[in-house]
Amino acid sequence: MLKEIGIGVAVAAFTFFFLQGINLLPLLFLCVLSYFLYSLSGMKVMNKGFQGQVPSKSKRITFADVGGQENAKMEIREALEFIKDSSRAQKLGIRPLKGILLAGPPGTGKTLLAKAAAAYTGASFVATAGSEFVEMYAGVGAQRVRELFKGARELARRENKKNAAVFIDEIDVLGGKRGQHSGHLEYDQTLNQLLVEMDGISTDDEVRILLLAATNRVDLLDPALLRPGRFDRIIRVELPDKEARLQILKLHTANKPLAKDIDLEDIARQTFGFSGAHLESLANEAAIFALRGGEKTLLQKHFVEAIDKVMMGEKLDRRPSDEDLKRVAIHEAGHALLSERVRPNSVSAVTIVPRGEALGYIRQMPEADSYLLTKQHLEEQIQVLIAGAIAEEMLLNSRSTGASNDFNQAARLAQRMVFAGMSHLGIVDQDSLPQNLLHRAVTRILRAQEKFVTEELKGKIHILRLVSRELFREEKLSGESLRQFIHSEDKPASQVSWG
Ligand code: ATP
């Protein structure tokens, strides 16, 4: 505001003197020059001040705030004992750890773990991200690395602490393999500076620094960073299993009024593949649904609706034409029937209410977290994926573009089967397998599954029609009502081969 008033006054004064015949151009030139010099010095100050972010004291995170990740927590704690009780470590001649790298998918709690690690050692904590070091100007990144470490030491001195933890999120942005970036000299200088700072950490330092870093892509990091003596520990931070999901849900619902009948275990079961960040968002969305519904407590239905929202996105306002809706209902009924066929009781909901990118979808309930997939399991997944398009073809005599995403996923699964030695090619070398052979093997798998699904649905065309009609009418069917409907409407068929 002051700036605008100043500019206004200056322009008015300049015009007044100009009309009086006084030439103010040299003065104007001087003003512009001083402003330019002032800005440059300001930039310097900004650069000098680059010291990462210090989290506010009220939000101190501890290991109790991190749900699951027991292995990661145990490994970090063990590593930190050397810092906490450095005299014991010194007696045994153990050199202190310089760096801990947390590697894993997004949203799994790497930043939380780094904060908890700092709190555990009682160290000062500064956090920054790899992207903060990426600048067009040569030398700025390297200077920022120097200032980050210097700033962390100063902070620890101010806080009367002997240890400081420096956390760099997305370290792959700054620590990628050298010589691979287009403006690689600047990148390389920045990484070199980080290596120099890490090598400079020693037991005798007045303030000992521990570097914590996180990445989703360890494979991109320069090997020099990963060699022992720099990042001494690489700790995997994985997606949570069911037990961990339950713990995370409990943490994020602790401050929310839950109805008595809430079954968080059921929600944890239904959220296979969710990260901690997904679960935090799920709890938040459930509370928003409760607010929208004018409820005082969060009900199970709010969580169920929130799962759909987190998985698929917000409901869309636009309603497709009846003709499209009918096609979507047939498509989804095809998926749902096949899913119940290959794994009874696997559908938890099927809907044709458009959400995010999808016009309709089925939600499947995983029985247990499984990390190894058998050939049969992969084939069944492919069958469920392609059943939508085949159902459309059977009842409407044509397919639609709605199935392209299903086909993409099915092809990816088929490719996985080929690389796992499950195709007619037997064991193959993924790197040297010619594209045409891969294509042929993938096509062969897809064709076989297509034949199987066509046969299956042919025998159930009556039930397919009934379920899609019901879905078109109701817009959403729960797994329970879908199964009841299948069994009550088609008793003879269910007795012969369903389930
Ligand atoms: P990215 O790789 O994208 O930087 P990240 O692994 O560092 O992600 P965090 O930033 O630690 O993930 O997590 C994001 C949010 O998700 C946290 O603030 C927290 O609310 C929630 N969260 C993630 N993991 C957990 C967990 N294990 N326990 C509790 N909350 C979690």
Image: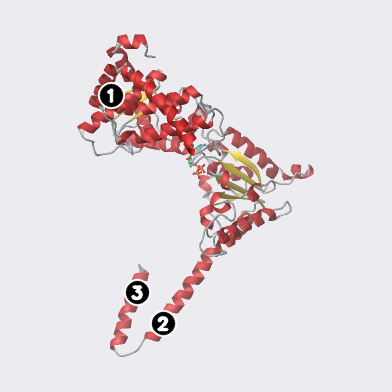
Judged from this view, the residue extending furthest toward the bottom is: 21
Distance (Cα) linking label 3 and label 1: 72 Å
Number of numbered discs present?
A: 3
- Which residue is found at the position 62% from the left and 55% from the top? 194
Q: Is residue 224 shown above or below 49? A: above
Task: Report the front residue among 470 and 285.
Answer: 470
The three-letter amino acid code for the residue at tag 2 is: Phe
Q: Which residue is mark 3?
A: 7
- Which residue is found at the position 55% from the left and 49% from the top? 172
Does residue 14 appear anywhere in the picture? yes
| Sequence-wise first label, 3 or 1 | 3
Q: Which residue is mark 2?
A: 29
Distance (Cα) linking label 2 and label 3: 15 Å
Distance (Cα) linking label 1 and label 2: 79 Å
Q: Nearer the viewer, mark 1 or mark 2?
A: 1
Task: Report the front residue among 122 and 147.
Answer: 147
- Characterize the local packing of mark 1: few (<14), some (14-19) or many (20 or more) Cα atoms within 10 angstroms: some
Using the rendered view, name the quadrant where residue 200 is placed.
bottom right
Q: Which residue is mark 1?
A: 394
